[in-house]
Amino acid sequence: MITFNEKEKTFLITNKSIALFLYINEMKQIETVYFGVYKEDISLKYRKEFEDNYSTSYFDTCKNEFIDHSDKSSNEHSLFEISGHDVGDHRPAPIIIRHADGSVATNFLYDSFSVSKGYPSYVDMPHATGEDVDTLTFILRDEFDPNIVLKYNISINNNHDVLIKNFEIENHSKNPINLLKALSLHVDLDSKDFDVHHFGGAWGYERNEFVNHVIDGEQIISSCYGRSSHEENPFFFLTNKNIAIGFNLIYSGNFKASIFTDYSFSTRITYGINDYDFDWVIEPNGLFVTPQASICYSGTGVDNMSQHFHRFINENLIQYKLNKRPIIFNCWEGCEMNFTTESIISYMKDAREIGSELFVLDDGWFSLRNDVMHGLGDWSVNKSKIDLKKVISYCHDIGMKFGLWFEPEMINYDVPIFKKHPEYVLGLDRAKATVHRSQFVLDFSNPEVVDLIYSQMIEVLDNHNIDYIKWDHNRDIKEANSLNLSKEHKQEFYHRYVMGYYSLLSRLRNRYPHMMIEGCASGGGRFDLGTLYYAPLIWTSDNTSASARMNIQYNTSFAYPLGTISSHVSKASDSSYETKSQLALFGSFGFEMNPNMLTDIEKEVLSKYSLLYKKKHNEIFIKGNLYHLSSSVDGLRIYEVISKDKTEAYILLIYYSDIALNSVNVLPCGLDESFNYKIDMPNIENNGKNLMNDGFLVEINKDSKFKISSVFINIIKK
Ligand code: GLA
């Protein structure tokens, strides 16, 4: 619901759970009067006013005099929805324009507004979709050139507490302008007493949680790797007691969040596409749309924030709707590129036996690809290595779907296009080009290159019955010099590259609407909302050992729903197949090993969890609510999932076997106070209220054979 009070010049944006209350002040700036949990009495009385020392005046160049504005706000201390650059108090501005005369002062001021139903929609980039949504669009004009118009969209959903914001910049002037910074949001918060939680790491160790107090000055959370990256995830959140405010960007490329404080007692957040090597020309009558950013406000803790993000992602972001996620068997960790038609068929047979529903032939099926040195960029089936039609039809005959691996944005030195079109490859204009995993990056900012890869991929996909593709991206971008872009447009590369990625994804989505896509970038190097718009799940990490995955998956699930977290039971030796299966259930379940090597007992264990997945996963793990119950004990993670109707829950305790604990008191969440529950541990039966207040004691079973152990608990209504 969006209400405008014309007399007061205020806007209330609310779904009766959270609210944002805005005021257009005398200076035509949009002030944030209130952002938080909904209250009945939200009004201008919440506005920060600074009488004495802080009242300001301005010089009116038309009237040629100083004007004292009765408005008792101070620029320095007010909270704004957007601040200017080179004006005011120098807090970071979300948008900076270099005008045709070279000046960079930018100040967007209120002009008018409109209200519409639904989210703003864009054909060429991922965005939120859905009904029961109201959008307020402010039209602002640059003080220094009113022909430059900024549309500022704020959307509120009546079913969850995730706000969507972005900007659209239109150049109605006669000259081109340059965007030096084009972020998606500016949020000023009325306190600097927050902890900042962000998720960084490296290949194989993605999404470690780092927590620090808001620092005086500026903290930057960013990527300039050309993708959202292993090193930082675009998701971060702020906490203060029960308040949790989360941020994420619907984007897969370079991003930058700045968390800024000064003497003003507020925290100022700007967030969007990284301005690193970014300089975008908008021609007259041209437009630049910034990716949508999502913000969730929770007054009742972190899990409430996570649950709202999960709902948003499942209901309003992922376009490929799945009634049930199939159990995926991926052959990579089993055989890498060493396979034959016969060995793949024998894998399929055993994979089916343990409950797999979709078989993925990973890297190595094309060109001369038997190692990482060869073949990328030549997506023709290696007929002398594999009879693809035969394995696909066998797979379908035994009741499994079939999937294939691609790495569309990359090229190896030995493929013909490399020689024919060196200008399609990044870095070759240098004396030394960076090679990583023996591969180079194709210039996806050039639509010709995207067309070429598209035509190769559809040649395979049109001629084979393929239900799924895994889309990989195994190196980051360096030497980002597109030979296709003129000097004036050179620094548009990174964003154009991401748009090329989206354009290929959406062309494939449109041509093969039934086909499922799994995202991947050397594991979790592109785990972001932009990718999830096209791909309902993402390979979470190349590290499949339980000791790594217990943290990676746990932390990933603060932002992303369990169904998006692709999680395979592998042959990793740090834990039992029981533990690995239990952990994989807290994700989109699958297998990744040599199935011919499994013993009968191992097959029995894996089949048991496949069965559980098929029976319970959708209702409890996908549609239910997730709680992070972890204590502060290092090396111990505790999660819970509970069905929407609160009749059944699962709790997983996963821990290092040498942990200095013999038992843990587990406090479950989200139970119905009045229900009686039975816990599948001897002698525990109690009602929801007592269980949530007092908890129950769980013995830590240490198995000296393994580094990681687990306890898996089922709670069911009696
Ligand atoms: C990346 C992926 C793996 C696998 C290999 C194949 O590392 O993350 O899952 O597909 O590439 O080369």
Image: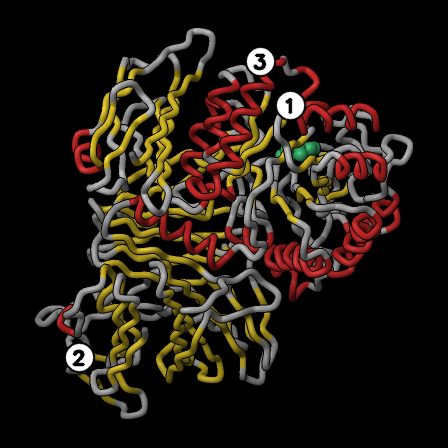
Helix, strand or loop at label 1? It is: loop
Helix, strand or loop at label 2? It is: loop
Task: Please tell me which of labels 1 and 2 falls first in the chain.
Answer: 2
Amino acid type of the residue tagged 1 in the rendering: Met
- Front residue of 385 and 412: 385
Is label 1 in contact with label 2 (beta carbons under 8 Å)? no
Identity of the residue drawn at 23% across and 59% down: 37
- Looking at the image, how many numbered discs can be counted on the residues? 3
Q: Residue 272: where, in percent of width, then height?
A: 46, 58
**Ligand 1 within 8 angstroms of badge 3 C-beta:** no
Is label 3 in contact with label 2 (beta carbons under 8 Å)? no
Please give the residue where the numbered disc 2 appears in the rendered image: 71
Kindly identify which numbered label has been placed on residue 601.
Answer: 3
Ligand 1 resides in the quarter of the picture at top right
Identity of the residue drawn at 21% across and 83% down: 8
Helix, strand or loop at label 3? It is: helix
Residue extending furthest top?
A: 704
Q: Left or right? Give the position of 572 relative to 651.
A: right
* Spatial CA span between label 1 and label 2: 68 Å
Amino acid type of the residue tagged 3 in the rendering: Ile
Identity of the residue drawn at 26% across and 46% down: 301
Residue extending furthest front?
A: 718
Q: Quadrant of the N terminus?
A: bottom left
Determine which quarter of the picture holds residue 58.
bottom left
Please give the residue where the numbered disc 1 appears in the rendered image: 593
Q: Left or right? Give the position of 75 relative to 354.
A: left
Q: Left or right? Give the position of 37 relative to 557.
A: left
* Spatial CA span between label 3 and label 2: 76 Å
Q: Residue 665: where, in percent of width, then height?
A: 23, 24
Q: Residues within 10 Å of mark 2 (few under 14, many from 20)?
A: some
Residue extending furthest left?
A: 52
